[in-house]
Amino acid sequence: MNKKVLLAALFLIALSGLMLHWRIHNFMVPDKLHPGVFLFDRTRFLSFIFPLTDVVVVTLLFMSRKTAVYGYLLNGLIVIYGTVFMAHFSIAEMIAKSLPPGSMLIKSTLPDIMISWVDFLIGKALYDLHLKG
């Protein structure tokens, strides 16, 4: 497989994750006391940092053979942290809402977690190509 194709795939899936995060965890929240005014929510902004780092830093690191190992490492760390955070968020929501077992899987963050692991696997394939030279 071509490195450029894998790099484009890595960038696009990371960008998709960023856009999904932006939609779900937008850090500019409406002020309930002042309609039309938005407030900065730093907690939601922290959840935005991981996919932003994935899009910008990981992609840049994978562009060079010398820094690909750091891209691979950072990509893996982001996926592991994201998996833990999303699973925790999902379990906490399900417990708080007392969802029936049948709807838990559908309403969980499992699809989002799987997308992040696809991002990691694309990075793994790209790293393997960098190793082969």
Image: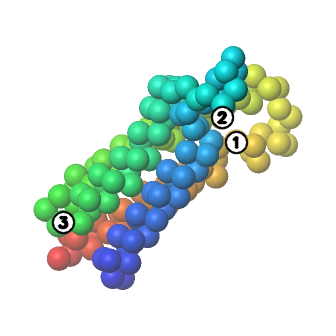
**Does dot 1 land on a helix, a strand or a loop?**
loop
Badge 3 amino acid: Ser
Q: Are marks 2 and 1 in contact (CB under 8 Å)?
A: yes
Using the rendered image of the protein, determine whether residue 102 is visible from the camera's viewpoint: yes
Residue at (17, 67) in percent of width and height: 65
Colouring: rainbow
Residue identified by numbered label 3? 64
Q: Position of residue 23 (x, y in %)?
A: 61, 46
Residue at (38, 78) in percent of width and height: 5
> Where's the C terminus, which quadrant?
bottom left
Relative to 58, 87 lies left or right: right
**Does dot 3 land on a helix, a strand or a loop?**
loop
Of the numbered discs in the image, which one, if any, rests on residue 108?
Answer: 1
Identify whether 83 is placed above or below 16: above
Q: Identify the mark nearer the N-term, 3 or 1.
A: 3
Q: Residue 24 is drawn in which quadrant?
A: top right
